[in-house]
Image (tube, grey):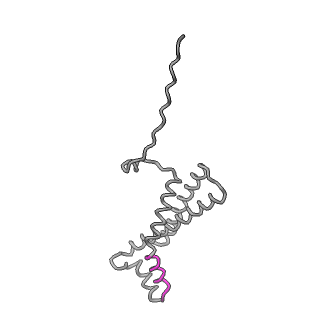
Amino acid sequence: MATTPAPTPRQRPVYRNIHISQIVSYRLPPAGIVSILHRVSGVLMFLLLPFVIWLFDKSLTSEFSYEQFTSAFVAGLWIFPGWFLKLVVLGLIWAYLHHFIAGLRHLWMDATHAVTKEFGHSSAIVTLALSVLLTLVLGYKLFF
């Protein structure tokens, strides 16, 4: 009587952590990009909070301090030229808008239980597009 050979077990895929040199070639889905940028925008807003408080103080204290506030964006402040201050404020604008829109996305997903791959993908693209579009609009207003 002939015996049939035992079936060979299928090799299971091996998942390894990626190395830092592979990070450039690794393609994140849009939801992953939004998640990382949500964290980056939160850290950026936290680190620039003293600058935001200074801006708020200078804009509201008196007429003289408001003149200092507006002239800082033209003539510069200390060693920083005016264009650099505008660039920092543009970064703050992006951080706020992205963090806000991504937060609304997460609230919507939590409230409606819309946790599907398709919705995550489409809402991440909308989040990225809206934050960049609104930043460009407000950046145009800031620079021109």
Q: In front here: 61 or 42?
A: 42
Q: Residue at x 53, y 65 (%)?
A: 99
Residue 29 position, x and y percent, is 51, 50
Residue nearest the observer in this picture, 99 or 93: 99
Location of residue 92 in the rendering, given as x and y in whole percent from the top left corner: 47, 69
Pinpoint residue 83: horizontal percent, then vertical percent.
39, 72
Q: How many numbered marks appear?
A: 0
- Residue lying at 48% horizontally and 80% vertically, measured from the top left: 56
Type of secondary structure dominating the magenta stretch: helix
The structure residue drawn at horizontal position 41% and vertical position 82%, both measured from the top left corner, is: 71
Residue 42 in view: yes
Would you say residue 125 sits in the magenta stretch?
no
Residue 137, above or below 122: below
Which residue is located at x 42 percent, y 77 percent?
A: 73
Residue 57 magenta: yes
Observer-nearest of 144 and 31: 31
- Horizontal side of residue 71 vs 135, given as left or right: left
Residue 143, can we see it?
A: no
Whether residue 67 is situated above or below residue 51 in the rendered picture:
below
Magenta residues, start to end: 50-62
